[in-house]
Amino acid sequence: MANLRIEHLNKRYGATTVLNDVNLHIDEGEFVVLVGPSGCGKSTLLRMIAGLDGASGGDIHIAGKLVNTLAPAERGIAMVFQSYALYPHMNVRKNMTFGLKFTGVPPKERDRRVAEAARMLRLEELLERYPRDLSGGQRQRVAIGRAIVREPAVFLFDEPLSNLDAALRVSTRVEIANLHRMLKSTIVYVTHDQVEAMTLADRIVVMNRGCIEQVGRPLDLYYAPANLFVAGFIGSPAMNFFEAMVERVESGCACVAGPGFRSFELSAPSLKVGDRLTVGVRPEHLGRGADGPFAVEGVVELVERLGESSFAYLRRGDDRLFVAEVRGRQTPTPGERATLTAAARDVHVFGASGLRISTQSDG
Amino acid sequence: MTAEQRVRSLSVHLVLIAYSVLAVGPILLVVMNSFKVRSAIFGAPLAPPDPTTFSLIGYQRVFRTAHILTYYSNSLIVTLVSMALVLLFGAMAAWALTEYRFRGSTALALFLSIGIMVPIRLGSVAILNMMRSAGLNDTLTALILVYVAQGLPMAIFILSEFIQQIPKDLRDAARCDGVPETRIFFEVVAPLLRPAIATVAVFTIVPIWNDLWFPLILTSSDSTHTVTLGVQQFLGQYITDWNSVLAALSMAILPVLVIYVILSRQLIAGLTSGAVK
């Protein structure tokens, strides 16, 4: 268990910058999820923490120790790979103990750790089997077991659930959460799946194009995204965006108008007349009949029924589509005209630079 | 199966059968005739031995007159030691060239691929001179050195391809586990290369075992002759002892056959892996 400090980390391959001045502090015992679209540098960051890739600049401290020049094994990390990366010619027990031989763990201690990990991960029956005889979920548990027996200061997970089918992904996700509760270890976890990120993380790090866009607790990211990228990335289906402009300002209240929605009043003192804005509203916050300052009208084009709710795709005045989540059995029919509203606290406003503009309803 | 499919599969099989007969025929002829008396070899070369023509005279003569066992053990030593060295150094070099980027690695890989294209026999005179000045003339060591040089480029080429197929995550996992680089090679990578190693082993062994050229120019005494060279003493300018030649050749086939059978399962896996995945 240890904290992790990353300062001004850079990674360049020739002319391309993969990571650009990344700063991140992770507390002891914290479960941090790195999330972002593919190619955003999250896996590279993880590999650099592991010591598998070198840095072009910047420092990595694990447990207060500068580890820039240390080999992976000396950093006190253990990594779980997306492909499991089990040694195919060794049985489960050997897979778990192989690395311990070289790090000076005496045989008795090795056996104890394997027994402990096997109990925790329900691998006792499988210890003498080979990876080829195991199912995907079992292989993933062995890979996690191999990390546990190293008793690392920091666990690194690189998209560990991507190769599993949907049902197994959910159960393994729960297992990883339980594991974190039991071991109370520091975990850095990379995924592109925001459900994994939201459910597992103490804090989420949203990355894009080699930079950190926002670091925060899952619900903070959801309810108060710092910028357009985070707003669009967190949440499914993605947030609806409407282009807007400030028309009038009267005693701290700005009147915001734009194509496709009814103009509304916004209490944001920093706004000036003529400011270009982007207004964002999540599909699940758009409702029929509810009253709110924000109202948008559209014609239903397509309805996706999920059971407990449906996603309605509507074409609005300026000929663009937006999505609304409709709960209950009553689903809208294509061709129907509907007016949807959202409460003031569910309306996100972003400035021309893409950064969030705080409004008074943010509280 | 439609008529067209049947015709197609029949024609494919005809070609394959014809090829097999062509390839196996001469070997069968050698083995068959090695068990016949001299007159029967010339009288009816295509007939199998029958009670009247059966004879072991060739084998008796080979064992009595020639140092066949010495030749045999020389061939075995040269072939097996060369193979072991080619596999060891080939795999290590292939690993280094694919896994690590270092100054001159591309040039080195290029240099080695030139070795595949240029036949080593072009350097016979230079090799002979080198061996003589190194005092290695007429030794098995000389042969082994030449064969290792001959086998290495191809071995490195084939093994590099296979090493690239081993998932990178596996090496990274081993590094995170704290396994030293040499142990990663010998205990993680090498076991996974088994099919490739079997393939390279067969490709290495056959030309070495069958080679006549280098034993001819590099060895001069009976104690260093190999089987292929030893057989030549039965081929005279005026009289050729066909019984002995055929008997010795039949025996020379055996070891390669045995090695092939042992490696064949791995070999097939090696030849087809990558094609069917």
Image (cartoon, grey):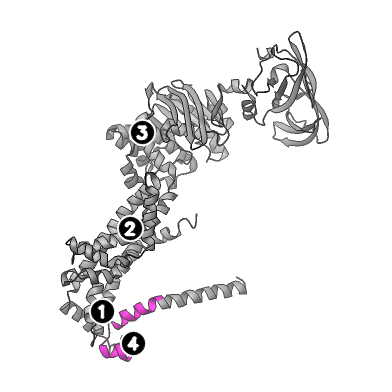
Disc 1 packing (10 Å; few <14; some 14–19; many ≥20): many
Determine if the magenta segment contains residue B132: no
Give yes or no for contact between labels 3 and 2 (Cβ–Cβ under 8 Å): no
Q: Measured from the top left, where is residue B217 in percent x and y?
A: 23, 70
- Residue range corresponding to the magenta coloring: B23-44
On screen, residue A63 versus residue B55, left or right, reads right
Q: Main secondary structure of the magenta part?
A: helix
Q: Which one is nearer the viewer's eye here, A137 or A202? A: A202
At horizontal 83% and vertical 35% (from top left) the residue drawn is A335
| Viewer-nearest of discs 3 and 1 | 3
Separation of residues labelled 4 and 1 (CA atoms) = 15 Å
Circle 1: residue type: Ala
Q: Earlier in the sequence, mark 2 or mark 4?
A: 4
On screen, residue B269 versus residue B180, left or right, reads right
Which residue position is annotated with label 1? B247
Which residue position is annotated with label 2? B152
Determine if the magenta segment contains residue B37: yes
In the rendered structure, find residue A248 and report the number of the disc placed on it. none
Element under label 2? helix
Give yes or no for contact between labels 2 and 4 (Cβ–Cβ under 8 Å): no
Disc 2 packing (10 Å; few <14; some 14–19; many ≥20): many
On screen, residue A227 versus residue B244, left or right, reads right
Give yes or no for contact between labels 4 and 3 (Cβ–Cβ under 8 Å): no
